[in-house]
Image: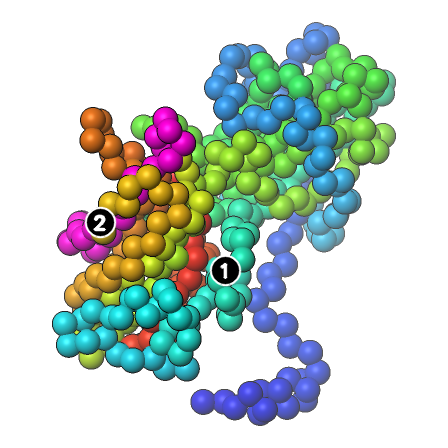
């Protein structure tokens, strides 16, 4: 193993070494503007917008967007442009029966457990989770001659996985708030966490004075054919903060949806891999800020843990139910037999449920742990494998 001192010396000799930085190039920006009748919304390239009523539960009011962060003009790196869009410290080993001392883990986060957060190697884990939602690239421009606002949705980057397969089917909704009745949408990009849309939208017949009163709202969602689409994140820009005389391109980090639809609470759990016993022990420690699912503003949470091999359910275990509690402490440990040769095909699905005596139990949120899940989940999985016989704990944001 290379010692840190030697690694540092090596880096000095090599002057500067950059790790993990990928240069993402911007894509073609050539498009043709075509005039249509005044007051209509026209989509060039791939999409045609249609005015329609919609479920606006995930769309914030204009007063919520007034405090949005002022945009900064972050131009993508220059590149050749084309004409076609691109799709583009060791702890104690488990006991003989595979169980760990989970109560000790919850009460004293010391040498028995390595505490991690999704964004750092060492963290106390008690701060608020800042879930990485990815970012989106788009451009805005206004034609004074044609009284037309042009919005081009270019691409997304490092979007979180929302589906069991470890990917998402993202698309973008575009609004000019406070108008919630009319929206435009990009096409859905199947199984893609770095989608390229390259779709241009024209808002025609908008006098400049009215455009400056609007807020451009972009919401990225994961398309679900059989249930409600999952919101991934949003971006809001008051257009009176943008110089609209020429087309400007922006990269913006996606933020959680302002109505809280993207927040379901967080779960603290630890993983312990014992290669000699071929076991993974899942410790469900505690949850915080769970979404209230009952009329009384609370929930009766319990946790189900499924061991999956490929797409098949192998084994299920669950915790006790905590009555009327949004910050439950479980402290329950579940060992699963997982031979080394099936690790890459193994997924652990953790579901926080709300118990209901009179109707079907509600899903509060889920976590998929494997080598191909979202960034935070993959990090936890790799940290578990890198620290055998050590309880590696991490907070996870629950997902729909």
Q: Which residue is the site of mark 2?
A: 320
Asked if the residue under mark 1 is in contact with the one under mark 2, i.e. CB atoms within 8 Å, the reply is no
Residue 182 image position (x, y, % from top left): 59, 15
Q: Position of residue 373 (x, y in %)?
A: 38, 54
* Label drawn at residue 43: none
For the N terminus, the quadrant is bottom left
Q: Is residue 245 magenta?
A: no
The residue segment tinted magenta is 293-318
Q: Residue at x 34, y 79 (%)?
A: 91
Secondary structure of the residue carrying tag 1 is loop
Q: Is residue 175 left or right of residue 391?
A: right
Judged left or right of residue 275, residue 296 is right
Q: Secondary structure at mark 2?
A: loop
Residue 260: percent from left, percent from top? 51, 35
Which residue corresponds to mark 1?
126
- Residue at 17% in and 66% down: 337
């Amino acid at each position: 193993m290379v010692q840190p001192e030697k690694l540092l010396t090596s880096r000095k000799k090599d002057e500067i070494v950059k790790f993990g930085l990928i240069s993402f190039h911007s894509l073609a920006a050539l498009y043709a503007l075509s005039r249509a009748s005044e007051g209509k919304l026209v989509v060039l390239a791939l999409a045609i917008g249609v005015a329609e009523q919609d479920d606006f539960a995930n769309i914030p009011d204009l007063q919520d967007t007034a405090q949005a962060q002022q945009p900064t003009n972050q131009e993508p790196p220059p590149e050749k442009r084309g004409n076609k869009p691109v799709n583009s410290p060791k702890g104690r080993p488990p006991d003989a029966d595979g169980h760990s001392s989970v109560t000790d883990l919850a009460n004293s986060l010391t040498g028995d457990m390595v505490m991690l957060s999704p964004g750092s190697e060492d963290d106390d884990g008690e701060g608020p989770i800042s879930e990485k939602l990815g970012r989106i690239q788009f451009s805005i421009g206004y034609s004074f001659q044609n009284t037309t606002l042009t919005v081009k949705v270019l691409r997304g980057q490092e979007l979180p996985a929302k589906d069991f397969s470890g990917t998402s089917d993202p698309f973008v909704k575009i609004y000019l708030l406070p108008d919630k009745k009319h929206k435009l949408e990009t096409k859905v990009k199947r199984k893609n966490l770095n989608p390229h849309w390259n779709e241009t939208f024209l808002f025609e017949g908008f006098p400049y004075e009215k455009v400056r009163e609007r807020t451009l709202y972009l919401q990225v969602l994961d398309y679900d054919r059989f249930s409600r689409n999952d919101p991934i994140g949003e971006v809001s820009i008051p257009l009176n903060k943008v110089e609209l005389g020429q087309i400007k391109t922006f990269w913006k980090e996606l933020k959680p949806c302002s109505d809280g639809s993207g927040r379901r609470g967080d779960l603290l759990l630890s993983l312990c891999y014992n290669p000699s016993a071929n076991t993974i022990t899942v410790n469900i420690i505690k949850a915080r800020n769970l979404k209230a699912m009952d009329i009384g503003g609370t929930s009766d949470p319990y946790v189900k843990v499924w061991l999956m091999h490929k797409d098949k359910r192998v084994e299920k275990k669950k915790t006790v139910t905590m009555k009327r509690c949004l910050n439950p402490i479980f402290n329950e440990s579940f060992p699963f037999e997982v031979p080394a040769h099936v690790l890459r095909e193994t997924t652990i699905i953790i579901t926080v449920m709300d118990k209901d005596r009179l109707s079907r139990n509600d899903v509060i949120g889920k976590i998929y742990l494997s080598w191909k899940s979202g960034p935070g989940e993959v990090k936890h999985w790799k940290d578990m494998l890198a620290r055998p016989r050590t309880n590696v704990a991490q907070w996870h944001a629950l997902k729909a």
